[in-house]
Image: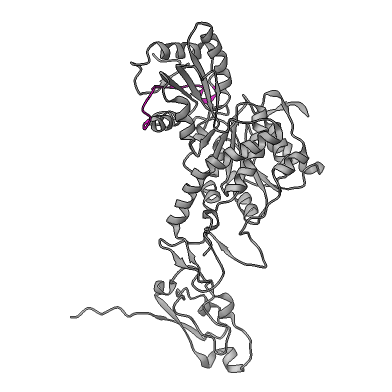
Amino acid sequence: MVKRKYCDMISRSKPGPGDGGNTGSWRVMRPVINLEACIPVKTKKNSCFNCWLYCPDCVVSKTIPPVINYEYCKGCGICAEECPTGAISMVAEATPVTEEK
Amino acid sequence: MHIIEAGNVAAAIGVKLSRAQVIAAYPITPQTPLTEKLSEFVESGELEAQYIPVESEHSAMAVCIAASTAGARAFTATSANGLLYMVEQLHWAVGARLPVVMCVANRGIGAPWTVWNDQQDTISQRDVGWIQLYCNDHQQIIDSVIKAFKLAQTVSVPVMVCYDGYLLSHTYMPFEQPEQSKVDAFLPAFTPKHFLDPENPGNFNTVTLPDIRLDVDGIMAPGYIEIRHNLQEDLRAALDTYVTIDKEFEKEFGRGGNPFVEEYKCEDAEFVAVCIGSLSYQLRDVVDIMRDDQVKIGVMGVQMYRPFPDQAITQALAGKKCVIVFEKALSYGNQGALYADIKSALYSSEKKPRIHNYILGLGGREIKTQHLLDALAESCTTPDTFGDSPRWIGLKLQE
């Protein structure tokens, strides 16, 4: 391997999942897609994809159906906010244990 | 071509000859005439550059960072509180390894408000990671600006070119203006390895994790500590790089040969006065007077303060009887910063000289040759009993 110059080893990355590390571990709320309400699934057309477009970490695929990569999804909820049909809901990752009486 | 002009204009001509492509600055005394001159050059078409007026020094440095990240040769200038206002961006520019060049016309810092010369503004920025060059006259200003662009793009570290406000920025002196074709040969256009490019999108300096990690290409990317370590190593290596650049410059333009320190009558000297900036030329007069009285004394001006040329300084000062450091700045609560750095450099030396510290000229207090003469006379007669605390020159109202 060619030795890299120190000054070239800057903090630089390309847009894409994993740019900020394993951010899936940050998630408190998990986005879940209700495929029955999802426009590309219902119409079988490459349309909408607001979730793919707005995801700041590029973890939603532009496929039918859209698939969320939970390895890197940090649970920000922007996809749920932007989904025009409300097909994405934010579900708690964990339910706190209720105190025993 | 020989011309007579102000120090600020010497700097502006240096920037023009270096073909800076983006200039962003906010006016502040005593830097203002420099950026005014540059805006004239851009307006008249003499300099093909984008001149971007900004609302603050913080924005000026932010514009330079953005321009430099896009691959442009970027320049700004400031003084005193303006420099302090851009400090957050100063750290950013160097952490991002951008070859920005900035002139600082040295001025005291408020409070209390002052517009006059001392060097607290840039000395306070010694730990940022920028390279700091200091000039003694107008010729050194124009030459240092051109060398600074070359040094910055060679080592990917931003460079500050500092010169005394008013004493140099506003006084007129003759100096040689290098030919454009020679400057072009010395300082060719360059393209950084990584820059903002729509064809090849990338993120720069986003959150960098404590540990190293694989990037999206599967290449191991450095963590924060590696990037900082590399900056330190590259800064130390920049000392040798600057020697090479200085030699190239000397070959092309016939001036140079003292990249780190400029010595005057030091060779046989038992006593050496040390300082930064134009004061070293004033001290030459004092040295001449004392030499007439058979005192073996010389003066040394430090021209590169960061990275600190500790070896060159040790070489120049080890074995002397006494070193007397004059400073227009303080590391408050301790001593003069240069004094402490020189002491530290001499620590490993076998023949340690005595070393004294004087503080003077803060906020433009006049530095009288007689005061310098009295201080040096005292240091030369009582080298062993001086003490480690800085003494103040020209201080009044001490009731």
Who is closer to the viewer here, B389 or B363? B389
Mark yes or no: residue B110 visible: no
In the rendered view, tell whether residue A88 sits above or below residue B330: below
Q: Left or right: B189 with respect to B258?
A: right
Who is closer to the viewer here, A101 or B310? B310
Number of residue marks: 0
As drawn, the residue found furthest toward the top would be B293
Image point (58%, 49%), residue name: B156
Who is closer to the viewer here, A91 or B261? B261
Q: Which residues are magenta?
A: B347-364
Residue B376 percent coordinates (x, y): 46, 14
Residue A35 percent coordinates (x, y): 51, 91
Image point (63%, 86%), residue name: A47
Residue B38 percent coordinates (x, y): 73, 39
Residue B133 percent coordinates (x, y): 57, 35
In the rendered view, tell whether residue B82 sits above or below residue B176: below
